[in-house]
């Protein structure tokens, strides 16, 4: 996330010769799947219009509060939380938090005076776009998944334009507002020229061994981590090594595994994902929209393990779409402990199947979604 380094804030706005640059708020976050495309769109906007002023709005305590400033942008945090599906009692304070967030949004929008607001998903995007719509400010939605979220569906009726990743989204949004763009992918991955050898050396592994990159997304994945841990000895027996992004909750346990096994590199988070993609012969991944988009661009043979509790089970729909095109394999989270490691090792040993999956997933790659979104927004505001 080093594509953009120059922070734009109220005290560090670029000189415009006395003319106020256009201002845009980008709202949302919660996971890398929302944050990374948001930053890609911001970078594209600034590339086409260097005087533009961009402010992010996210949820306090969530990863956007750390990752967005690292990308060189200012962010304001809201006191808001999402609906907790596993514990209804934890939702008691939600109405109060939502009300408080609207007051915060009112102040942010009143001070920054944006020409447009872009929502990229995550519960912090709803109050920002909803308030902007009541004020007659142009609003744009980027819906990354093949099954739209309820908040985006509610906001879509009054949105200026809705950018979607795939066809068939008319069942969720007004057809005349939809533009199929694909999902924005980080430029560090689109323009990746790192060789497999360089990627392997970055993780201090052996270039002679097949390498599996395991990622549960930016927050980690319990089902994937437990399945990999349970089958760790099978990797060693088959001379296969691991790059293992665990998320914070499993990092300590995985690091202990790495200490006792030189075939394993483990960490909670990988900032330079381009090295991991370059090193990998096979990838194990959740099937969030952004993970899928990046894997298509990276052209990697992948075994998807969809997160089973994603809204409307959209991750399974995302993965199944690729499986139907012979562009990926899929293992259910509930079957991961028994089937994941044997499936991954079999794929790592089958170069013919790897070649087929690599070719088919590469056909689905979209590398300029960020530019398409940025140009359309600038045209309409």
Image (cartoon, grey):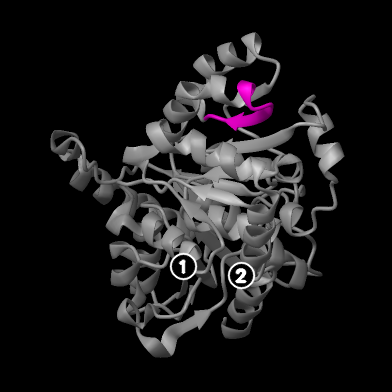
| Badge 2 element | loop
**How far is mark 2 from mark 1, CA to CA?**
12 Å
Q: Are marks 2 and 1 in contact (CB under 8 Å)?
A: no
**Lateral position of residue 204 relative to residue 337, left or right:** right
Residue name at image x 60 percent, y 45 percent: 347
Looking at the image, tell me whether mark 2 or mark 1 is earlier in sequence order. Answer: 1
- Mark 2 = which residue? 364
Residue name at image x 35 percent, y 75 percent: 156
> At which x and y percent is residue 145?
43, 64
> At which x and y percent is residue 346?
57, 41
Residue name at image x 57 percent, y 66 percent: 183
Q: Viewer-proximal residue, 101 or 17?
A: 101
> At which x and y percent is residue 192?
80, 53
241 inside magenta stretch: yes
> At which x and y percent is residue 42?
64, 61
Q: Viewer-proximal residue, 360 or 372?
A: 360
Q: In this view of the protein, can residue 69 be seen by the observer?
A: no
On residue 324, which mark appears? 1
Give the magenta-colored segment's residue range.
236-246
Q: In this view of the protein, can residue 367 be seen by the observer?
A: yes
Q: How many marks?
A: 2
In the image, residue 152 sits, relative to residue 280, either above or below, namely below
271 inside magenta stretch: no
In the image, residue 247 sits, relative to residue 325, either above or below, namely above
Residue depth check, mark 2 versus mark 1: number of the one nearer the observer: 1
For residue 374, what is the image quadrant?
bottom right
């Amino acid at each position: 996330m080093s594509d953009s380094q120059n922070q734009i804030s109220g005290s560090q706005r670029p000189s415009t010769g006395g003319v106020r640059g256009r201002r845009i708020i980008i709202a949302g976050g919660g996971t890398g799947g929302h944050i990374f495309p948001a930053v890609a769109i911001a970078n594209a906007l600034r590339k086409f219009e260097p005087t533009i002023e961009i402010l992010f709005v996210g949820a306090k305590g969530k990863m956007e509060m750390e990752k967005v400033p690292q990308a060189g942008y200012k962010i304001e945090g809201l006191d808001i939380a999402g609906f907790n599906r596993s514990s209804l009692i934890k939702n008691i304070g939600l109405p109060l938090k939502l009300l408080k967030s609207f007051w915060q949004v009112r102040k942010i929008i009143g001070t920054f005076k944006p020409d447009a607001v872009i929502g990229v998903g995550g519960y912090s995007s709803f109050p920002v776009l909803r308030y902007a719509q009541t004020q007659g400010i142009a609003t744009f939605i980027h819906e990354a998944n093949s099954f739209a979220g309820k908040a985006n569906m509610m906001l879509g009726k009054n949105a200026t334009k809705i950018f979607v990743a795939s066809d068939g989204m008319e069942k969720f949004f007004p057809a005349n507002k939809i533009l199929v763009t694909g999902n924005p992918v980080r430029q560090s991955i689109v323009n990746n020229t790192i060789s497999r050898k360089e990627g392997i050396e970055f993780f201090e592994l052996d270039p002679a061994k097949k390498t599996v990159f395991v990622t549960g997304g930016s927050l980690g994945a319990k089902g994937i981590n437990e399945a990999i841990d349970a089958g760790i000895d099978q990797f060693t027996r088959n001379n296969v090594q691991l790059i293992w992004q665990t998320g914070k909750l499993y990092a300590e346990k995985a690091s202990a595994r790495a200490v006792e096994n030189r075939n394993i590199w483990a960490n909670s988070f990988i900032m330079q994902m381009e090295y991991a993609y370059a090193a990998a012969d096979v990838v194990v991944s959740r099937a969030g929209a952004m993970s899928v988009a990046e894997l298509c661009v990276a052209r990697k043979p992948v075994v998807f393990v969809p997160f089973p509790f994603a809204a409307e089970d959209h991750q399974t729909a995302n993965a199944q779409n690729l499986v139907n095109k012979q562009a990926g394999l899929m293992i259910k989270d509930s079957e991961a402990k028994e089937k994941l490691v044997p499936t991954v090792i079999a794929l790592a040993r089958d170069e013919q199947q790897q070649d087929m999956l690599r070719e088919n997933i590469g056909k689905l790659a979209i590398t300029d979604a960020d530019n398409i979104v940025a140009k359309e927004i600038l045209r309409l505001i």
